[in-house]
Amino acid sequence: MTSAAQATEAGNFVDGELIADSEGSVSRSPADGTALGTYTEADTTQVQGALSGARRAFDETDWAFDRQLRHKVLNQLADRIEARSQELAKMLSRENGKLVGEAQGEVGSAPATLRYCAALALTSTGRAAEVRAGLHMSSVPEPIGVAGVIVPWNSPVILSVRSFAPALSAGCTAVVKMPSQTGLVNGILHEIYADTPGLPPGVLSSLTESGDLLALELGTSPLVGVLSYTGSTRVGREIMAGAAPTLKRVLLELGGKTPMIVFDDADLDTAVPVLTKGVTVFAGQFCMTGSRVLAQRGVSGQLRERLTAALEAVVVGPGDDPTSDMGPMIDAASASRVDGLVRRAIGSGARPLVRGGLLADGSAFYRPSLLEVHSVESDIVQEEVFGPVATFEVFDNEDDAVALANGTRYGLSAAVWSRDVDRPLRVARRLNAGTVWTNSWIVMADQFEEGGFKQSGLGRLRGPRALEEFQEYKTYVHPVRLGGG
């Protein structure tokens, strides 16, 4: 790294101001441990300043009820992220390890989400009727108040925008907790927010934190009316418990065990490359990782052979190396944790079709693994691994496929692979999953909702429903005296 990169100092954005600490925490590359720069950790003063600023901006400015202002600011944010997209993507690849192309895809999707939410700010409507002669009633949405947003490190740019953009569009103000693993990426975003001229102070604050001070405050503070969290199911339960005393609304997008259901009539030339990417994108550190391959018996032998060869050929290396097919995990501890899960699964009877593993002791690089299992009750099937590991399960018919696919506590997403025109929809309607793809994976659109069934979450982001998650409905009752004037 150059000395300029090492001198990077990333600040927090609090109540309209950038706050930087030259003695901040060091951010290191997961690929080789290189120091990339320093970032500012949130402290109690900054947390309280962000919360009080958000409440003041909601109560004392026009933000909550000025649709045109919200529309303008969200578009300004989109323009400024777009203008610095290459810088953001480059730093994201260095700091959390994902391939440059993956980082560019993430950063490139953020402006579109902001612009969609900008349009929603102008199109959100209520309803009205004359219920009976002389009785007029209407229901209109109003913003809840201050929105808290807790963002994971695997896709910090788009996952922060995915929550705060509909919150701002709805008229809420927002305080965002960003992950310390991407402190320098966060710093670029914070500079962008500070450079957005129409953004009133307090409407959006964003802070980097490695601990849980801000997360706890967002969950328990009476100043916060709605909380959006993306992360693990375990922490999601804790978030709900912390929010219970204030009865704040909680939106959760949590873990997943995405079943990729491959029927005998599937096009394997199309399926195998996508199934391979389903395991290796972001080094498997993704809530929608295609971590369960379900193969119908007639095609299972061919699929087993072809997917094994594809995963064995994956080149693991630095995210900014153009020859890499998969980057490192976020840190060596995570890679070691995943290796322990794979070891235990093999010890419990799973058959390693591809036995990946650590490239070296103490390394964050982990080769992908594929394990054949014969029981849906296996821990490696039931638990989210959050790494480049997939299981291989065989089924006989549609009923078997549905039973296996629905056999975990998760229900975030699924995919169905078949040339039959009717089968994908017939199977999809029986799956307990918030998103089901046909002959594809990870195709998303801002216009359509995203979220999970069962223990994969509560509520929906994206689509018109996202705005409603940050709103309450108020009903106006207006009797009219009929007759003479």
Image (tube, rainbow, N blue to C red):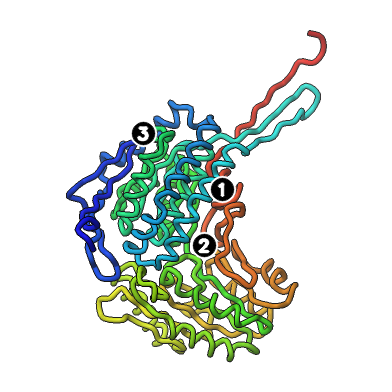
- Mark 1 and mark 3 in contact (Cβ < 8 Å)? no
Mark 1 neighbour density, 10 Å: few (under 14) some (14–19) many (20 or more)? many
Amino acid tagged 1? Ala
* Residue that numbered label 2 is attached to: 455
Mark 3 neighbour density, 10 Å: few (under 14) some (14–19) many (20 or more)? many
C-alpha separation, residue under disc 2 versus residue under disc 1: 19 Å
Kind of element beneath mark 3:
helix
C-alpha separation, residue under disc 3 versus residue under disc 2: 34 Å
Give the residue drawn at x 68%, y 83%.
265
Residue 251 in the image: state x and y as whole percent.
Answer: 50, 51
Camera-side residue of 407 and 265 = 265
Camera-side residue of 322 and 270 = 322
Camera-side residue of 197 and 137 = 197
Question: From the viewer's perspective, is residue 469 above or below residue 134?
Answer: below
Question: From the viewer's perspective, is residue 207 above or below residue 303?
Answer: above
Please state, as top left, top right, bottom left or bottom right, where the N terminus lies in the image: bottom left
Specify the label residue 466 is tagged with. 1
Amino acid tagged 3? Gly
C-alpha separation, residue under disc 3 versus residue under disc 1: 24 Å
Kind of element beneath mark 1:
helix
Give the residue drawn at x 45%, y 32%.
58
- Mark 2 and mark 3 in contact (Cβ < 8 Å)? no
How many badges with numbers are in the image?
A: 3
Give the residue drawn at x 62%, y 76%.
403
Residue 30 in the image: state x and y as whole percent.
Answer: 29, 68
Please state, as top left, top right, bottom left or bottom right, where the C terminus lies in the image: top right
* Residue that numbered label 3 is attached to: 53
**Among the two numbered marks 3 and 2 on one chain, the one whose residue lies closer to the N terminus:** 3
Amino acid tagged 2? Gln
Give the residue drawn at x 41%, y 31%.
57
Residue 157 in the image: state x and y as whole percent.
Answer: 42, 54
